[in-house]
Amino acid sequence: MYLVNKPVHIAIAGGNYGGLSALKSLYLSLLATNPDYDGTSQAPANPNVKITLIDRRDGFVHYLGMTRGLSQPDYARKLWVPYTEMPWLQHSSITIKQNIISRITATHVELVDSEHVEFDYLVMALGQSRNAPIGVSASTHSEYLSAMDKYHDVILNAQSVAVVGGGAVGTELAADLKTDYPDKQVTLIHSRELPVPGPFMDEFRHEVVKVLNKLGVQTIFGQRVVEESVSVEDFSLAHVKHANLLPELIESVKRDATLVTSSGAKVHADVVFNCMGSRNKSPLVDLASSSDAPVFSTAGIRVNKNLQIDDPQYPHIFAVGDVSNRAAVAKFAGAAVKSGSVAGSNIAKMVLAKGGDVELGEMGRRGNAASAYSRIKLVLGEHHTVIQSESGVVPPEMASRMSAPDIKLGKALKNLAVGKFPSHSR
């Protein structure tokens, strides 16, 4: 065990893919350091390290599977894993604060109850916000299960479902619902002529449309929803406390609604899901830039190849996952896990160097930087996957073989060491 004059304080803002990956890396690099540690029991106590994980939830949520979770109740119950099921998080050096972050400065994280969490190093793993249910409004495992039961009941009793927004999430949700409820009318409404905007090939988009048509999803493209009348809006709580900080606290599901499109067409749906995109967490970040370029832009928090904020004032602050501009246009859970691991390892190196020079690890950009296109994988129900690489659209048969049946839930749980302790060999 190394010794320092006072404990080093490391804060992690966000406890999902990126934040937990950073924490796992710190655990292995700063806590599980004795030669005989083999991952079969808790790492020994280390009074020199204090790590605080801050998240409003009491567990990990596998967001990748959320659209499938809305159509399959049994799968939905597996998507939330309480932190208590990860025994390594119960280490004496680790504190979990279940709270809402209201502000991040260069020295502390401020919570909505005015508590300040001071830090020497910080990992920002804030993710992005989507309205519930995709964004998940629940703060506890029991709240989540209750909410999902309500969604499933509403979907089961509906004859027609409309999904507004044909990005990646909207197309996957429409496909999942039609796959698992083939007798229901499922309509996807999107403002552009083809779904899934972004740096993707039209060939890819046409393949997505082909699958949607094959499944029987009714598509209304090139039209916006300009008016809606709703008879039942018990899910929509626009004035939920702290919703200004976290849009995911707002339930966007509407029932018994009539939607009017820009062409004047009317679409009635027993249930409407709004999948109109995500928002970043820039209102939370109070970090001034030392240059004309803002720290937080529409692309995300500006970071260098080591995932430190790309500003000489903040070498002790790292940003990982969707909140970082290294995530580029397409947001990937796998990239969040990788970037979290890199950031955690780099902080450990800086701590152990005690102010001396240290060579930090780098996070490369996903794919070919010279390509005009980005990688993307859409899982459209249980039987169809559409993948685009930088070079083109992957043939359907090959794409299906490249898709995990559980939408990588098992991989995520293994990476998080659920029910066990992390190991240097895993």
Image: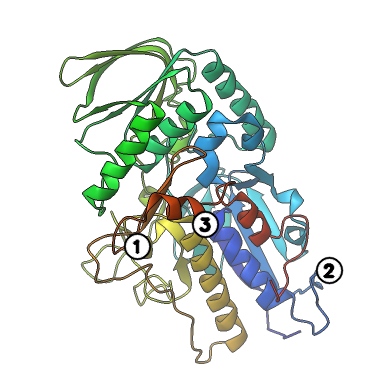
Q: Name the residue under label 3.
A: 109
Q: What residue type is labelled 2?
A: Thr
Q: In this view, does 131 lie above or below 107?
A: above
Distance from Cα at disc 3 to Cα at disc 2: 34 Å
Q: Which of marks 1 and 2 is in front?
A: 2
| Label whose residue precedes the other's in the sequence (1 or 2) | 2
For this orientation, the residue located farthest to the front is 397
Are the residues tagged 3 and 1 within 8 Å (C-beta)? no
Foreground pick, 243 / 85: 85
Residue occupying image coordinates x 17% and y 21%? 262
For this orientation, the residue located farthest to the top is 231
Q: How crowded is mark 3: few (under 14 residues within 10 Å), some or many (20 or more)?
A: many
Horizontal arrangement in the rendering, residue 176 relative to residue 40 (left or right): left
Q: Is residue 267 above or below residue 53?
A: above
Distance from Cα at disc 1 to Cα at disc 2: 37 Å
Foreground pick, 259 / 138: 259
Check disc 2 and report its element: helix, strand or loop.
Answer: loop
Disc on res. 325:
1
Q: Name the residue under label 2.
A: 40
Horizontal arrangement in the rendering, residue 343 relative to residue 269 (left or right): right
Residue occupying image coordinates x 37% and y 36%? 171
Residue occupying image coordinates x 58% and y 23%? 152
